[in-house]
Structure formats: C-alpha cells, structure tokens
Image (cartoon, helix red, strand yellow):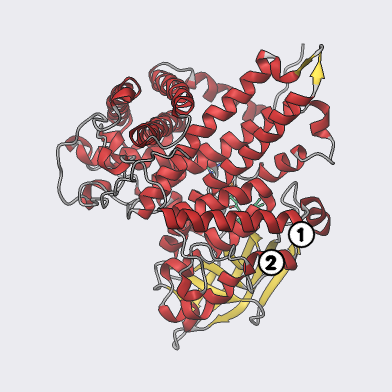
C-alpha cells in the first residue's frame, strides 16, 4: 500500500430521520449522498483480524479440504467443520462474549468472499449456518437463548439451519402451512413439513410455522426432539457436500424457552434474516468470480493456438475485461451495502436484494464465459469449472428467486412514490408484496423531510463527469416510475416486465454511485499505488452501466411486451412448441 495514505475520514452516523434507505429515495428523485460518501472501509484493527481469519481459512483448507472428495462423500466433513470452528470461522459476526469474532457486516463479507473463492459448497454450508441458520437467534434471541445456543454454534460444535421452504410454499413463503399450536404453558406443538433445508440433519433449526389464526411464529427446534423426522438427503446437481434434507414435524413439543420473539413475529424474523443473509451471498459471489477469473487468465496465458497464447485474441480479452470491470462494480456495491448496515441504516431490504440479484446473476454469466475460455478442458470433471458451474446454478433461485426479488425491488421503490403523489396515495400494494417481504414504509418512517440535492456534490472533482450522468438517470427514473404509476395505478403490480426494467435501472444506478464513491475515496486519500487503473476500470463500468440504465428506461416506453405476452399464451395453449417446417 502507498506510504502516504491519508487518514480514513470518520464516517458520519447515518441520519435515519432523513432517510432509512439509500435506494428507495432514488425513485423519488432524491440522492442522499451523505449516506454513501465517504466510502465505508473497515477500521485498521478489524482489517488485521479479517486478514488473519482469511489466512487461517486458506491454510486449513489447503491442507485438509478436498472439494471433490467432499462431493464424493456427500458432506464437507465433521473434521472440516471442527477445524474451521477452532479457527473462528463459524462465528464470524458473533460477539466475543459468546466466543465469536465480533466482525462487522463488512468484515463478515470480506471473509466470506474468500470462502466463496475456496469452494462454493463450503460457502453454502457455512452460509446456511451463519448467514441464515443462527442469524435469527443473533438478531432476535433473548439473552438466555443467546447464552444457551451461540457459544456452541460460534465454535462449530453445533451447526444451524433455517427451515422456511415447504412443498407448497417456496417463493410465497408467507403462506407456509406448517402449524404451531400454542399450549397453556407457552410451548407449541409443531406439525408440518419442510423441504430443501440445508444442514437439515444438524443441531439447531429455526423453523417457521403459523398458528390456526394465521400468526407466524419462529421456533428453535433441536436435533433429537421427539417427533422430528429427518428425511432423505436430496440428490442434487451441485452442492453435493451440502446436507440438504426433507423434514417432518410430527407433533414436536417446542418449549417456551425455544420460542424466538413473540407470536406474530415469525414472518418478520424470516424476512429480516433473509435480508441480512443476502448481503453475504453477494460477497460469496465476488469470491467465486475472482477464482474463475484467475483460472481463466492463467489458462489463456499458457494455452497457445494459432501460434499465440489465447490471451492475445480480442474475443478472449473481451470476456476477461468484462468480468474484471463488472467485478469492480459489484464489489463496490456489496461493500457499500455492508458499510451502510454497519453504520446503522435500518432498512436495507432493497439494497440487499439488489446485491443478491446482481451478484448471483453476474457469477452465473461470468462462470459461463470463463468456462468457455477453458475450452473442452472445462467439461472434464478433474477440472474445477464444471463443479463451480453446478454448485452456483442454484444461487439465483434460493434465498429469494431473482425474479421475485426484481419485483420486490421495483414495488418497494414505487410504494413511497405512490404515497407521495396525492392522487395515488390510496394505491395498495400490500397483498402481493406481503408474500415478498415486509415493506418498511419509507415516507411514513421519515420523521422530517428535507430538500435533497439531486446530484452527487461531494465526490472528488475529477469524477464529476461520472457523477453528473447519475443525476439525469435518477430524474428519469422518477419520471418514468411516476408515469407507470399513473398509467396503471394498483395494477402496476401485474406489469412484471416493466417492473424488471425499473429494477435493473435502479441496480445499475446504485452500482454507479457505489463505484464513484469508492474511487472518490481512493483519489482523495491516495489509497493505492495504482489509482489510475482503478479509475479506468470505474469509468468503464460506469459508462456501461449508464447505457444499460438508458436502455431499460427506453424500453419501458417502447417495447414488444404485448407480443411476448401473446406468444407465451400461445405456447401455453399448445402446451409447448409445435411448429414445423
Ligand atoms: C440447494 C438448495 C438449498 C436450499 N436451502 C434452503 C434452506 O436452507 N432453507 C430453506 O428454507 N429453503 C431452502 N431452499 C429452498 C429455496 O429457498 C426455494 O427453492 C426457493 O425459495 C424457490 O422456491 P421453489 O423452489 O418452491 O420455487 P417456486 O416458488 O415454485 O418458483 C419457481 C420459479 O417461478 C418463478 N416465480 C415464482 N414466483 C414468481 C412471481 N411472483 N413472479 C414471477 N416469477 C415467479 C421464479 O422464476 C422462480 O424461480 C433451498 C433450495 C435448494 C435447491
């Protein structure tokens, strides 16, 4: 690192009275730059601890963990869990009071990025345990529950699971059918079925169910409880060393001390845990892309065809350049998010959905491109590419299917805008959105309204040419959103193709803001030896992202949606495709 690094400016506390979210106000045409500048980075001491944990993870897995063997065995291995636990890697964000490492959200993400680089399966097993499995106890548990469960979980002596999905309730998790019957002594009798539960045969499961009156509850079910039936392990395409189970609850008595939160809190707990968990799925995706990029760069440098290394061909470079530049944008966005969460931004549901969608989809496309560059070799199972491809395919499906999250992103942004427009205040999005997540109401939460600048004023002067176009995009986002709302009113919820475009536009606006904020910080503080290279990548990413925003917003006004609708309906009528020459 450069010797003359300037001191890290102290970050202001997030003023949640003005805005509890950064992305939602974009739909109103507001840019709350005080939230995103300066770019958040971990403090020096935490950075040191993060580096030690990363080093420990690499050293231990290099020596003891073989992803292919784990795949053949069908489980990453109890010895691996124990070894990683001893090194602090199973309780990364848990307070030292319970034996954890006490990392911030950013610290957790940075370590998780490396786990994603080591092996996607390992990142899923550790992610199910930490990002969602024990998160409910960490966020909503009583002191007694934390004392009882967290020390063993943080040390890796026990593993945690998150049991929400059911045969008839996947994306529509609000309508789960598992029943929790309250008893006089405060306990519950639990009946029902869950499917696709990671770490499902392990020790501490947060299980979601409803009472007969429809109230959602979150219950901590422990391995060995009478009536808990752990079904077969699913045969899966990838993630074969993940313990994916079907569970049955045949009148399981869950004692009062294992009830998480209050009756009625269950869905909120599930959604908030998932919001938080999605942050690390973004970070894990960064790690996996870094690994794939390294593999492809090495391969294309070494492999020669037509008398030259593959690395010298334009279409090879194109894939490498695309991957490196998008990676920079995604990384900027992922760690701006975690920094905002660390600074206390209360409503990050939209931001975390954005990183989940952008990260997992980018990983998929990048993996395909890097696979292509390895040629036939990539298809052979002693090479790492095909395993990564199989492992990651489910990322855009679980923890909220990406299309569902796209709808959520757009509707979450449209709702405050509708509330602000006097003639549209009655528009009610509550029904469909309730199944997508708990919608924090931005405008009602806001205690005072201030005139917000509609531009990024505080960025480094050299970056104005990147920052100014963002202003125009935000203004246009508001204009187009308002037009859609006026045109469709409440029925805008059914305009999913348009909602997808709005979601993609706001994802790319946010990505530009994050990238500009990061590079601004680099320039202000002479943070690295090669600021010119970072700036060049950032300029390229922002220029491309700006074009994508324009394309999405253009298509809202000019598209062939009606044609797609008709062709799809015809395919449904024909039950497929029947045209022949
Ligand atoms: C490997 C693996 C690990 C998992 N781990 C866990 C776990 O640990 N805990 C847990 O609780 N669950 C887990 N799951 C379940 C996972 O979260 C669900 O599979 C996911 O939520 C999608 O639900 P579904 O499979 O029922 O798909 P469905 O809900 O049937 O959706 C299928 C597809 O339909 C489309 N779709 C659905 N609704 C809409 C809509 N409103 N608008 C537009 N399109 C829509 C989407 O394209 C979606 O991908 C896991 C699944 C897998 C495969």
Question: What is the x, y in percent for residue 280?
Answer: 52, 50
Give yes or no for contact between labels 1 and 2 (Cβ–Cβ under 8 Å).
yes
Label 2, residues with CA under 10 Å away: few <14, some 14-19, many ≥20: some
Left or right, 157 with reference to 532: right
Q: Residue at x 65, y 60 (%)?
A: 198
151 or 159, nearer to the observer: 151
Alpha carbon separation for disc pair 1 and 2: 9 Å
Question: What is the x, y in percent for residue 389?
Answer: 71, 39
The C terminus: image quadrant? top right
Residue that label 2 marks: 83
Question: What is the x, y in percent for residue 402?
Answer: 53, 41
Left or right, 491 with reference to 288: left
Residue that label 1 marks: 64
Q: Secondary structure at mark 1?
A: helix
N-terminal of the two: label 1 or label 2?
Answer: 1
5 or 252, nearer to the observer: 5
248 or 237, nearer to the observer: 237
In this rendering, the answer to whether 480 lies above or below 287 is: above
Label 1, residues with CA under 10 Å away: few <14, some 14-19, many ≥20: few
Asked if residue 182 can be seen in this view, the reply is no
Left or right, 556 with reference to 394: left
Q: Residue at x 82, y 59 (%)?
A: 73
């Amino acid at each position: 690192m450069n010797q003359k690094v300037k001191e890290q400016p102290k970050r202001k506390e997030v003023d949640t009275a003005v805005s509890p979210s950064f992305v939602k106000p974009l739909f109103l045409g507001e840019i709350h730059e005080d939230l995103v500048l300066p770019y958040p980075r971990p403090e020096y001491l935490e950075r040191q601890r993060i580096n030690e944990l990363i080093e420990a993870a690499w050293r231990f897995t290099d020596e003891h963990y073989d992803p292919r063997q784990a795949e053949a065995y069908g489980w990453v291995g109890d010895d691996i869990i124990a070894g990683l636990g001893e090194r602090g890697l199973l309780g990364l964000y848990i307070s030292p009071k319970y034996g954890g490492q006490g990392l911030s959200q950013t610290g957790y993400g940075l370590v998780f990025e490396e786990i994603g680089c080591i092996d996607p399966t390992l990142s899923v097993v550790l992610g199910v345990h930490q990002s969602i499995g024990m998160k409910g106890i960490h966020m909503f548990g009583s002191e007694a529950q934390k004392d009882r469960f967290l020390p063993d979980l943080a040390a890796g002596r026990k593993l945690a699971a998150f049991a929400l999905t059911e045969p008839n309730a996947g994306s529509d998790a609000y309508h789960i059918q598992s029943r929790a019957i309250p008893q006089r002594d405060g306990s519950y009798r639990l009946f029902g079925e869950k499917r696709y539960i990671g770490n499902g045969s392990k020790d501490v499961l947060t299980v979601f169910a409803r009472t007969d009156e429809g109230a959602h509850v979150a219950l901590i079910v422990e391995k060995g409880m009478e009536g808990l039936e752990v079904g077969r392990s699913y045969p899966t395409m990838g993630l074969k060393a993940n313990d994916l189970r079907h569970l049955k609850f045949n009148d399981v008595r869950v004692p009062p001390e294992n009830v998480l939160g209050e009756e009625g809190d269950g869905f909120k707990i599930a959604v908030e845990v998932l919001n938080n968990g999605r942050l690390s799925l973004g970070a894990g995706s960064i790690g996996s892309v870094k690994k794939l990029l390294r593999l492809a760069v090495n391969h294309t440098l070494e492999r020669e065809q037509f008398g030259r290394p593959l690395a010298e061909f334009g279409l090879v470079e194109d894939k490498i350049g695309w991957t490196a530049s998008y990676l920079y944008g995604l990384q900027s966005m992922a760690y701006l998010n975690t920094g905002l969460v660390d600074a206390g931004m209360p409503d990050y549901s939209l931001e975390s959905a954005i990183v989940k969608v952008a990260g997992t989809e980018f990983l998929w496309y990048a993996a395909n491109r890097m696979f292509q560059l390895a040629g036939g070799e990539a298809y052979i199972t002693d090479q790492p590419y095909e395993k990564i491809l199989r492992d990651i395919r489910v990322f855009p499906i679980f923890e909220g299917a990406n299309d569902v999250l796209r709808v959520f992103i757009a509707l979450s942004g449209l709702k405050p805008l509708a509330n602000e427009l006097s003639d549209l205040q009655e528009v009610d999005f509550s029904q469909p959105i309730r199944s997508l997540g708990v919608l924090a109401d931005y405008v009602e939460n806001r205690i005072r309204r201030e005139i917000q600048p509609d531009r990024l004023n505080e960025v480094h002067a050299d970056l104005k040419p990147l920052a100014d176009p963002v202003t125009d995009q935000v203004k246009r986002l508001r204009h187009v959103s308002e037009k859609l709302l006026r045109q469709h009113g409440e029925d805008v919820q059914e305009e999913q193709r348009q909602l997808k475009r709005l979601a993609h536009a706001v994802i790319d606006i946010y990505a530009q803001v994050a990238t500009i904020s990061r590079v601004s910080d680099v320039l202000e503080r002479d943070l690295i030896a090669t600021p010119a290279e970072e700036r060049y990548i950032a300029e390229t990413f922002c220029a491309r992202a700006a074009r994508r925003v324009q394309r999405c917003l253009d298509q809202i006004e000019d598209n062939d949606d009606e044609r797609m609708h008709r062709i799809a309906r015809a395919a449904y009528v024909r039950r497929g495709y029947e045209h022949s020459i």
